[in-house]
Image (cartoon, rainbow, N blue to C red):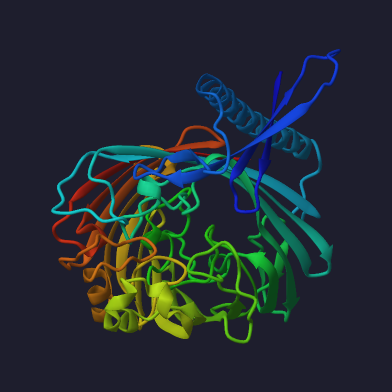
Amino acid sequence: MLIMKWMTAHDGRLVATWIQSAESGCAGCCEAAIMVKLKWTMDRDGRLARTPAQSGETMPAGMQGDREVLWSIFKRAIFLLVWILMVASSLALAQEASTTVPSDEKSWDVQFQSTVVGQGHPSFPAAYTGSNSLTTGAAVRETVSLDMTGGARLWHGGEFFGDILMWQGYGLNNALGLAGFPNAEAYRVGKTYPDVYLCRSYLRQTIGFGGGKVAADDGLGGKRDDRNLTLTVGHLSAKDIFDANAYSNDGRSQFMNWALVANGAWDYPADTLGFTNGLAAELNTRAWSGRVGIFQVSKVANGIRMDWNLTHAWSSVAEVERRYTLRGHAGAVRLLAFDTRSHMGSYQETIDSPNLGGNITLTAAYRYKYGFGINLEQEIRNDLGVFARVGWNDGKNQTYEFTDVDRTATAGLSLRGSRWGRPQDTVGLAAVANGISGVHREYLAAGGLGITVGDGALDYRAERMVEAYYNWKVSRHFHLTPDYQFAQNPAYNHVRGPVDIFALRLHSEF
């Protein structure tokens, strides 16, 4: 009889141990263990492929196929069960809340969200294709995310927030081929089966200085002084605090393109999934806000592990925000500056050393990258708002955390459906223009690879994109969004594309 046990090795490989034992009751019963190490590799279409290690015997072909099918069914069943339990729990909590006396201030709060994105593109022309290029053939990929977020009041002004994320799926071409990648729900660590990650766990302390009262927007309700000092420390996303925008900020309900969710030129500190450790301070008045923060950076470019050499590896960011009203309509201007110190490679040193074969990691040393950003939002009518972002960084050293953008300009509008009787629906339209520095161009033209781009050669043009979406509120808890994006000069290459990208997003929250 064969008995199979699955284990995970330290390097992330699945290890199947087959135990072959004699029939019970036989004299001299013995057991023989056969170790099969299956190494997971990624093919060009974004699918995982398994290859047995040289040191082990392979599983019988027929049994391997059966086990693979059963394992796939089991994973999907567990994923569906967790989703059902989360939805059922949220409905129960909502029902319980409806039977209690309403309160402006909660002592605790639990919320759930789920976002499913299916995205694809037809085939498109290209003079050549590199290892980081978007595949020229037609492709369809999907991503799924589930979040359980919670908050609790600990003491006067003190709060704790946590977020457990479960995700599955892949971005197009494993999130490669476009600097302005079209799916904000796609991570560079794709998963064929659900994985779980504690993406937020932080403390927040708000110290009031009087003035008027404003509603808190953290899920716990209540009001706070409009003049206050807010301190945040823990595991979170730097985007939770900096570079917010009312119309272009959330890839689960607004625009999906990376360059429209954040300033593309801000190489913001984050691990592969977009989170880090750090602390921030915010000083707020009725019309002004000033924010500063310092965060950890990855040990390697966009890696999952953080660099604990804190005297040499960190990222600081500062932002000033001015809020105002123009003819009775709210607006805001935000100025951002950042300075990142990390173990990054140099474009120029890599170009000057042909013997390195274009491998920028071989020039890695503790270096810096700095940049600036402008973020604008303005309500035009009660149902119409416009926005814009402009960003720049020095572009001398390796893009380390976010995406391969050194200069960016975005602009767009957001219109609610009041005029056609759908006030909870939203239409969005935006344009993106991304660029890179001169030395960054030389590096890519010489065959260098970035975090998201690298065609093996380069006929440089600015990457231009347009995105349009319609967020349709199907019911109280569900939104369905068709999305279209047009990409010209993908990955800054004039001889590739253009590409038409279509998506359908289902978002639910409780």
Q: Write down the quadrant of residue 287 in the picture.
A: bottom right
User: Quarter holding the C terminus?
Assistant: top right
Return the residue found at the far front: 28
68 above or below 125?
Answer: above
Q: Residue at x 36, y 60 (%)?
A: 452
Q: Is residue 408 left or right of residue 38?
A: left
Left or right of residue 108: residue 45: left
**Where residue 13 sits: x, y (%)?**
58, 46
Residue 413 against residue 3 in the figure, above or below:
below
Q: Return the x and y of residue 233 as percentages of the image width and height.
A: 70, 72
Viewer-nearest residue: 59 or 409 = 59
How many marks on residues?
0
Residue 379 position by quadrant: bottom left
Q: Is residue 220 visible?
A: yes
Q: Return the residue nearer the eye: 251 or 156.
A: 251
- Location of the N terminus by quadrant is top right
Q: State left or right for residue 463 relative to residue 506.
A: left
Q: Is residue 116 visible?
A: no
| Image coordinates for residue 40, horizontal then vertical, percent | 50, 44
